[in-house]
Image: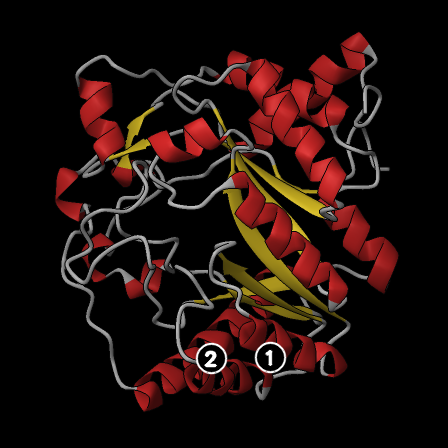
Amino acid sequence: MSERWNSYGPYLEKIYGSRVYRIGIDGGFSCPNRDRKRSGGCIYCDGTGASAIYQRTKERGFTHKSSFNETVSNSDPLDVPSLEQRCLSVKNQIERGRQFLRQRYKADMFSAYFQAWTNTYADIATLKSLYDCALDEGPFTEFIISTRPDCLGPEILDLLESYKGRVEKVWVELGLQSADNATLELIERNHTKNCYIQAVKALHERGIGVCTHVITGLPGESLQGYIETARLINQVGSEAVKIHNLDVCGGTKLNDWYAEGEVSVASSRRHIENCIGVLRHLNKEIVIERIICETPQHRLVAPRNFPDKSAFLSSLKKAMEHLDYTQGDLA
């Protein structure tokens, strides 16, 4: 374990002997939780679906220090290009990403990371074409797919398993968010805790790694709720976790609730407390891939005074050192 928690970077160096850098890919997918006009969806989703900035033309010209700008709320109808265009885009994104990472970090090991939207939400032929287009641009150390627990049918699972021979490790990032079904209903996830449990089980049966995405600060939840989520992650054997603090983006139902005073967002101090609670209850072997949300400032309504990633991680580390806490000491 590195420092006070099992950090992602040192984990990769231990496994592969070097840093491994992700190349984020937008495959032109959508989400079953939103319609073609991009209405509906989870209460916190502003319609960007974690898509790459170069895929969001409205946001060109903004910087990390930009003020909130309501005009970038992405509510436009989803323009789905042809499969040929999507494959070409995937190849171009990988080439641009690889060049950037080599120039900035002197990187020489990469993972292909389908990051935007629900990356198993298509027919098998389409998925195979897009995945093959990406992996043909390799070599890649890992192949990572971000998706929902309700979008992993048997054929999709078999397809993902088939790529194990082309990379060192196949991973699926699953959006759980909370282990409380009442919370999942409130935030309009449209899946249940049991759906997540079954998805993890099916992935593990095929030797596919699982990273679980959770959110602290959801309406109605407290530290005890986050601890219960950590215990569920331990129970199913998820190998990695991403922790996000709740933030409010423009153009979302959550923003409406925030404007009406129905919800609040955690301060950095509160998120440190929440993270400590979660980390102490997670098994020490679980890899912590992320601890803080980094929504661009021009899309962010709240919190506006949060420290940057480096400052937050430094404060979290100091707090855990002062209290002599480590990941897993209450697991």
Numbered mark located on residue 127 in the image: 2
Discs 2, 1 touching: Cβ within 8 Å: yes
Q: Quadrant of residue 173?
A: bottom right
> The C terminus lies in which quarter of the figure?
top right
- Where does the image place residue 127, in percent across and percent down from the top left? 47, 79
Question: Mark 1 sits on what residue?
Answer: 159
The residue under label 2 is which amino acid type? Answer: Leu
> The N terminus lies in which quarter of the figure?
top right
- Secondary structure state at the residue bearing disc 2: helix
Q: Is 207 or 25 nearer to us in this picture?
A: 207
Q: Is 279 or 149 nearer to us in this picture?
A: 149
Colour pattern of the rendering:
secondary structure
Residue at left 74%, top 60%?
Answer: 204
- Secondary structure state at the residue bearing disc 1: helix
163 is higher (above) or lower (below) than 171: below
- Where does the image place residue 39, in percent across and percent down from the top left? 18, 50
Can the viewer see residue 217? Answer: yes
- Where does the image place residue 122, in percent across and percent down from the top left? 39, 74
Residue at left 73%, top 49%?
Answer: 9
- What is the CA distance from the residue labelled 2 to the residue labelled 1? 9 Å
Q: For the residue carrying disc 2, how many other residues have a C-alpha within 10 Å: few (<14), some (14-19), or many (20+)? A: many
Left or right relative to 173: residue 81? left
Can the viewer see residue 20? Answer: no
Left or right relative to 325: residue 35? left
The residue under label 1 is which amino acid type? Answer: Leu
Q: Earlier in the sequence, mark 2 or mark 1?
A: 2
- Where does the image place residue 254, in percent across and percent down from the top left? 27, 30
Residue at left 41%, top 17%?
Answer: 220
Numbered mark located on residue 148 in the image: none
In the displayed orientation, state which residue is furthest to the top.
323
24 is higher (above) or lower (below) than 69: below
